[in-house]
Image (cartoon, coloured by chain):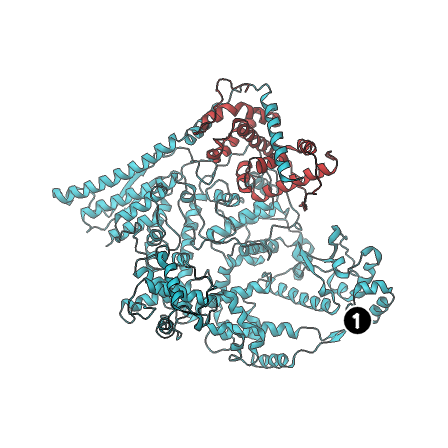
Chain colours: A red, B cyan
Amino acid sequence: MKGDESVSAHKNNNDGITFEEMYMKNRNLMMFTAMKILNNFADAEDCVSEAFFRAAKIFPKISRMECPKLTSLLVIIVRNAALDKYRANKRVVAVEAPDEETGTFCTDSYSFDSVQSAIAQLKDEYRDVLTLRFVYGYSVKEITEILNISADNAYKRIQRAKTELGKILENGGENV
Amino acid sequence: MNKDMLNEALEKALTESYEELTGQDIPDYDFSDGFEDKMARLISEQDGNADKKRRRGIILFFAAAAAVAVICAWAAMGSGLRPDRHGDYHDSTIIQETTSADKNETVTATTVTGGEAAVTHTAVTSAEAITQTADKTETTASAAKAPAVTSPSAAGNNSNTNNSNSAATSAAGTANAVTTAAAIRTTSAAQPMRTTSAAQSVRTTTAAQPVRTTSAVPQTFLTTDTQPVVTTTTAIIDERSFEMKKMAAFASALMTAATAVSASASASDGIPRPPYFSNVYYEEHSYDAKCIIKMANGDFDLDLNQDGTFDIFDVYAHYRSVFNAGAFKEMRERVRLNGDYNHDGYIDNYDTQFLVDYYLLYNEIDTQWFDPMYFRSNCPDSYYDLVDEVYSGDERITDYTAYLQELGRDYNEWSDTIYQHQLSSVPLYNSKEMWMVDIDSLHGINHDDIDLDELIKQLSKEQAEKYGPVMLVNKNEGEEYAVETSRDWAFLYDRKAESEQLLLDNAYLFSRLLMDRANAMERSYEFFEKAMDEKIDELDINLDGRFDHEDIAYIFAAQNLDSIMKRPRELRHSEEEWALYNSLDEETKAALGPDFMKEEIFTPDSEDEALYIAMKADGTFDRAIEATKITLFGFYKYDMAFTLDLLRFYTKYNPILPEYKDDAFFDTVREGFSRFGIGGYFKSLDKNGYTEKNYTLYERYYNELVEAIDNGTKSVPEINGDGVVDINDIYDINVFLREKSNSVAREDSILPERVLTNIETNCDFNDDGVSGDIYDMSISNIYLMLYLDKFPNEVHEHYDEYVEQLKAAKTGARQNISYAYASNAAMMSSMNIDRSGDANCDGETDLADAIFIMQSMANPDKYSLTEHGRFNGDVYETGHGITANDALEIQNRLLNK
C-alpha cells in the first residue's frame, strides 16, 4: 500500500498480525479517510485514535483477518467516527427518519448486478453497517462497540439500510 | 433478493472499495506527539507487554507483603522483641501512607475486557471510600440473623431493607466521592442540543416493554478504576499483641493491594456498580450500561446547576434544558457542553433518560420526587414556566394526588359513556398523550364512503362537550386527522392528559418521567413498600388487628365491586342519534354491524349488589378503596401494577398457604368473595408459591430454624424418615418440590410412602402449622446443604440416578414430568444468611481464603472461585457478590477472633 511500504504486509499465519503492525500498516489510510470527511488535521487524528481504540476492543478477533478485510474494517470504523465528528462539529441534528416498517423484501429475483449497483448507491453509513453485519458477521452488540453507537441506533441503522436498499432496487436501481 | 446474494454483493463491494482505497496516493502523515504517545501506550497494552508487567507487579507485591508480614510475625515471636522498642506501639493508630505506582499521575485506564474505551482520569483520593468499607463490619455482623417479626408494626425496619439501604447509602456515598472528583471530559466542540417540545414523547416504558431478567445475585459495589493515593488509617487497640499489630499491617497492605488490584482488574471488578444494578433495565456490558457507568466513573461534570452538588435538581436541569421547558440560556449551554451521555453527538431525551436512570440507580429513591410540588417548592434554579402564566391563583394545582384522582374519576365516566355507545368494542390505542381511535377498526368501512365526522359528532356530542378533542387515526393508511379544538368532536385525551394544565406543567411531567423510569428499573416497589409500611394500619381492612390474607381479600373484592357497581345501568341512544342512524343506507348499516345501536338495561347481579351494600354499611368497602390510594400520586399505569406490588408486600409479612390459591377458600373470609377470583391473584405471585425477588420471609424462617437447632429446641431436618441425615434428604426435597410444582397427585408420586408421610407430619420447620409447605422444604434444603457442606452444583451429581431408582421402585408412577434438579443457588446466594468465609472450600476459614479471593479477582482464569466458594466468601454485604471487601472482612474476622 502506498505510504506504508516500509512495513511489509504481514502474511497471515497462525499467530495473526500484531497490533503495532496493524497500526503501522493502516494509519495513513485511515487518516486519509478521516481527512476527506473532516478536512481538519486535529479532528482527523482524534478520529483515527478513536478508531484504533475501538479496534483494540475486538483485536483478538480481527488479528487473524486477511489484510484487505482488516483494512476495510478499519476504514469503516474511522469513517463512521469521522462522520460522527463531522455532525458534532457542524451541530447537525441528524434528522432521523421515523421508524419505518421494513416489511419483507420482495422475493422477486433481482440480478446480482442490480444488487451490487444498489449497494454502491447507498450512503456510506448504511453500506458500512450492512457490511459489518453480513460480510463481517458481527452481531448488533458487536456493531455497537465498533461504531460506538447504542444498540437502538444500531438496530435502526440496519433496518433503514435494508429499507433503503430495497427502495433503490424497487426504483429500478436508482436512488430517488 | 436473497441473503446470499446480498452477502456476495457486499463482499464484492468491499473488495472493490479496498482496491480503490489502496490505489490512491496516500500521504505520509506527520502525526502529533500526543497522538503518537497515545498510540504507543495502546500498542504496548494490546501487544501484551504492559499487561504482563502489571500482573507480575501485583502478584509480586502480594507475595512481598505477605512475606514481610510472615517474617515479621515469626521474627517477633522468635526473637523476643519487646514491644516498647517500637515507639508507636502504644499509639492508638497506625498511619500508613502508601501510594500506588502512579500517585498523582494522569493515568490511562487499561483497556479492559468488555470494552471500556480508554479514558483519562486524574488521581482521585479515595480514602473516604477505604475507611467507609472498614466501618461496614457492624452492618454486616448485625445482618447475620434477621430479627423475628412478630407483627407488621414491629417490622418497620426490616433487616433486608436496612441492609439494602445501608448498602445504598455507603455505595451512594462512595459513588458521590467519585462523581465529585474532577471530571475530565475532553470535547473539542459543544455538543448540539436537540430540544424537544414538551409534547414529544420521552422514551417512557409501556406495559409491553420487557423487563430485563436479572441475576439473583446483585452486583457488588466496587471501588473505582482510578489509581488512588491511599492514606490508610487503622485503629489499633492498645492491648493488642505485637503479632496482631503486624497482622494489622498486613491487612493494610492487603487493602492497598486490593485497591491496586481492583484498579487494574477487568471491567467486571474495577468499575463501580450501583447497588441495584442487577435488578434493572440495563444488561451487563451493554452500551447503555456503559453510559451509566461512565457517569459513575466521573466522566461527566454532572453538577449542571453548579450549586456544588449533584442531586435531583441537576437531573431536573437537564430535563428542562432538553425539553425546551423554560431553562435559561446559561443553563442550556452548560447542558449542551456536558450533557451528551451516550456520545451520539446530540443532547436529547435519551441523555435525559440516562441521567435519570443513573440517579435512580445510585441513590435511594425519595418518594417526594413523585410529587410535582416538591420541584415547584424546592428547586434552587429559575425556570420560565408557561403554566404559571396560563393558570394562576386558584386555578393552579396544589394537590396533585387529588387532582389526578379527580381526573381518574372523569376517565371512568368517559369510559362508561363510551361503553354505552359501543365504542368500547374498538381497540383503543394509547400513544403519547392521546387516545387514537382507529376508524377502520371502529366501523369496518372505508372512511371515504361516509361522513364519519358527522356521525361521530352526533353520536358522541355529549362526551365531546365534556371531554374535548382527541385524535382520530386511520391506522392502516398512516393518516392522522388534525386535532380539532372544537368541542363538537368526540375526541378524547388520555385521562392524565385531559388536563391542558398538566401538559404544560413541567414539574408534573418530570415527576412522571421519574416514576416511569423507576417502574422500568423495578425500583418503584421500594417506595411502595416504604409507603405501605408507614401506613400499614390502614391495611387492616377488617379491623382485626392484623394485616393478612383476609385484608387482601377485602381489597380485591372491593375493587371488583367498585367496577361492577359503576357500570351504567342503561344503554340508550338519543332521538337525534336514532334519526341519523336511520338516515344511513342499508349497506352502511350492515357495515356498522347489528350491535351498533344496541340498547339495554343493566342490572348488577343481586348478590354483588347485596355484598356491596353490606360492605358499604360496615365500612370495609370504603376502607378497602382508600387503601388502594395509599401510594398513588396518580402514577400507576394500570391496576395490575398496584395489585402485584400489594401482593409482594403481603408476602413480606405473611405466608402463602396452598388454600389461598383456591377461589372458594375466600368464602370463609366473607360469603360471596369466591366470585372475585382472589385465588388467582395469589397464584399469580409465583406458581411455586413464592416471589422470586423477596426472600425476606425465607431468611426469617431459615434463621429461626438455625437458632432453634443451635439451642436444641429443634433437631436437624430429616426429610425422608430413614433416621439418617444425608444427601438423600436433599434429593427427596427436590423430587417433592418438582411434583408439587407439577401438581402431581399423591398417589402418583415416585416418593415412597414413608417419605411422603414424614414430610406431611414431621416437617413443619417454620412452625406455621403446616408441615411440608414451600417454606419448610426450602429452608430445610438450604440448611441441609450447608450442614452437609454441599452447594447446589455439588449436590446433584447422583441425583438423576437416584430419581431413576425411585421411578423404578414405584410402579404405575407418572413418568411424563421432568424431575430435573432445580438449583436454588441464586436464592441462597441472595439471602442474607451467615457465610463461613471459606472461599477456597478447604474446610477452614483463614488467611488463605482472603488471599484466594484477591487472587481470583486479579487472575480469574487461574484462580477460579467455585459457586460454593463464592457463597462462602460473600461475607461483606452478603448477597452482593464477591469483592475485595470480602477479603478484608475475612481478615477483620480473623483479627477479632
Horizontal side, residue B634 vs residue A18: left or right: right
Image location (x, y in percent) of residue B570: 74, 75
Quarter placement of the N terminus of chain B: top right
Image location (x, y in percent) of residue B439: 76, 58
The chain ID associated with circle 1 is: B
Q: Is residue B864 visible?
A: yes
Image location (x, y in percent) of residue B172: 44, 50
Q: Compared to B698, does B316 lie above or below?
A: above
Q: Foreground: B475 or A84? A: B475
Say few, some or many: other residues with alpha carbon within 10 Å of mark 1 (under 14 / 14 to 19 / 20 or more): some
Image location (x, y in percent) of residue B642: 55, 64
Q: Is residue B327 visible?
A: no
Quarter of image, res B103: top left
Q: Foreground: B680 or B273? A: B680
Q: Foreground: B725 or B348? A: B725
Quarter placement of the C terminus of chain B: bottom left
- Total numbered labels placed on residues in the image: 1
> What residue is pinned by disc 1?
B573
Indicate the secondary structure of the residue bearing disc 1. Answer: loop
Amino acid type for the residue under numbered disc 1: His
Q: Foreground: B272 or B762? A: B762
Q: Which residue occupies the extreme left position in the image?
A: B80
Horizontal side, residue A41 vs residue B569: left or right: left
Q: Residue at x 52, y 64 (%)?
A: B645
